[in-house]
Amino acid sequence: MSLQPLTRSDRRALLPLLIIAVALVAALLWLPGTTNSPQHSGTPADTTRRDATQAAVTQTDTQPATPPATPQHFDPNTVDSATLTAIGLRPHKARAFIRFRATGAVFRKPLDITHIYALDDDDIDLLLPLIRISPRYQDRRKKYPIGATYDTPATPSHTQSAGTETHQLYTSNKFSTPTTVDPNTADTTLLQRIPGIGSYIATWIVRHRERLGGFHAVNQLLEVKHVTPDMLQWFDIQTDSLRYININTASFHILSSHPYIGYSRAKAIDNRRRLYGPFTNADELNATGLFTPDTLALLIPYLQY
């Protein structure tokens, strides 16, 4: 039996039948129940991973939060910069702390860190409660209150009774009558005789005085932390020891270290000097727009041209 080739009319007749057949096959493949529906798709491994992830999330939600780490105590004579940074000190200040100690400085008491001018009052407040100085570094000299006498069996006195010790009661050394103190020359011992001023405030007054170059107005003392207006009655400013800054020749370090100038203003002043030459008066400094009128008024007494 010989096969005859399909004519054009035959092919036209078979084409619709072929299309219908393909459609029926596709319909059968997509009938419900013949394949996994989307909601049931996925291998057993995928289902296991989803269940494990959900369990982990649930467990995390129910577990208590980890308490924050408590700042650790440290000895300023041995601490490293990483520990200081972890406590909350800025990295450049931590490096300045280590550089200061590398000069040979020894911290005998916590307040000795106030000699590091890179630290501001907030930094000192942060560090002081955490300082624990090892006995090997502590100042072993005995310090007795003013007006107190101590008689011990090792150092007998003529007034000591046999087998007994006599201790004179502590006498306060605070000023009891109106007295004025020059904060530009007073040391911390004298400053502590002012009612309301202890070792912390006295140290901060001296520290701020050194950074300024001296006080030229009594109200500047209010810039010191914890100094209150009622304390100002005990001060009388003498400006003979005021330290001046030549605005045209002072180094960038000296300018930026002054509390009324700072880093950004010192940089702008340095650029202004290089581009336009030296300043001749305070009006030219005011024209730069770097200072508010109040800050410039506080700064002018320290400047030379």
Image: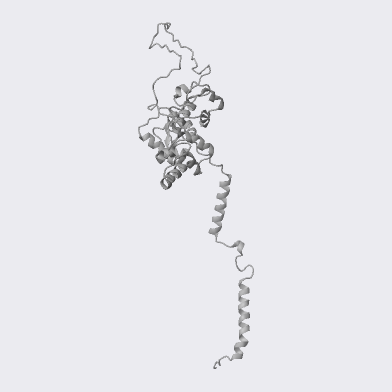
Q: Is residue 235 left or right of residue 26?
A: left
Estimate the x, y position of residue 147 in percent, counting from the top left.
Answer: 46, 14
Above or below residue 303? Residue 275 is below
Viewer-closest of 130 and 229: 229
Left or right: residue 234 compared with residue 160: right
Using the image, determine if residue 288 lies above or below residue 115: below
Residue at the right extreme, as displayed: 32
Q: Quadrant of residue 79?
A: top left
Residue in the picture at 53% in, 38% down: 293
Residue at figure coordinates x 62%, y 77% from the top left: 23
Q: Please provide percent x and percent y for residue 100.
A: 38, 35
Counting the numbered discs, the total is 0
The answer to whether residue 122 of the structure is visible from this angle is no
Above or below residue 259? Residue 41 is: below
| Horizontal and vertical percent position of residue 279 | 44, 41
Q: Is residue 268 visible?
A: yes
Q: What x and y, as percent, mark residue 162?
A: 42, 6
* Quadrant assignment, res 277: top left
Q: Residue at x 61, y 84 (%)?
A: 15
7 and 230: which is toward the camera: 230
Tell me the quarter of the image containing the N terminus.
Answer: bottom right
Q: How did the renderer colour the structure?
A: one colour
> Where is the C terminus found, in terms of image quarters?
top left
